[in-house]
Amino acid sequence: MKINRHYLNLAENYLFSKEYFKAIACLEKALRLAETDETKRIINYNLAVVYFHIENLGLAKMYVEKAE
């Protein structure tokens, strides 16, 4: 989880800086490394938030559904 936490923190910083595509790259990497369902839910929710910000509502919805 330490590596995932690094990518999640980095993605959060990119999100706040409005560097959405960098945030997506970090979250996708974290998702590939995720070991637990809880971690995957958190990452999927964060991906939904980022896609919402770039107005890709189709992908935002998909990731929200994965996070449920």
Image (cartoon, helix red, strand yellow):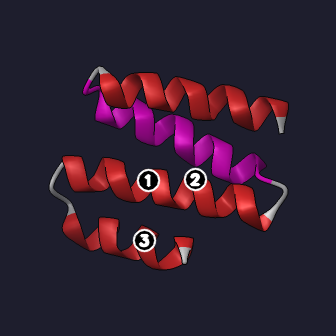
Q: Callout 3, which amino acid? A: Val
The percent coordinates of residue 33 (x first, y second) are 77, 47
Q: Which residue is mark 1?
A: 47
Q: Is residue 15 left or right of residue 29?
A: left
Mark 1 to mark 2 CA distance (whole Å) = 6 Å
Question: Quadrant where the N terminus lies?
Answer: top right
Q: Is residue 66 left or right of residue 37?
A: left
Above-or-below relation of 21 to 10: below
Q: Callout 1, which amino acid? A: Leu
Q: Which residue is mark 3?
A: 64
Instruction: Identify the mark nearer the N-term, 2 or 3.
Output: 2
Q: Which residue lies at the image location 83% right of the left edge and 30% below the top edge?
A: 2
Above-or-below relation of 42 to 41: above
Instruction: Identify the mark nearer the N-term, 1 or 3.
Output: 1
Label 1 Cα crowd, 10 Å radius (few <14 / some 14-19 / many 20+): many
Q: Callout 2, which amino acid? A: Ile
Q: Is residue 10 left or right of residue 18?
A: right
Residue 16 picture quarter:
top left
Residue 56 picture quarter:
bottom left
Q: Which residue lies at the image location 68% right of the left edge and 26% below the top edge?
A: 6
Q: Which mark is residue 43?
A: 2
Q: Which residue lies at the image location 65% right of the left edge and 52% below the top edge?
A: 31
The percent coordinates of residue 3 (x first, y second) are 78, 30
Evaluate if marks 1 and 2 touch, with contact meaning CB atoms under 8 Å apart: yes
Q: Which residue lies at the image location 54% right of the left edge and 35% below the top edge?
A: 26
The percent coordinates of residue 67 (x first, y second) are 54, 70
Q: Which residues are magenta?
A: 18-34
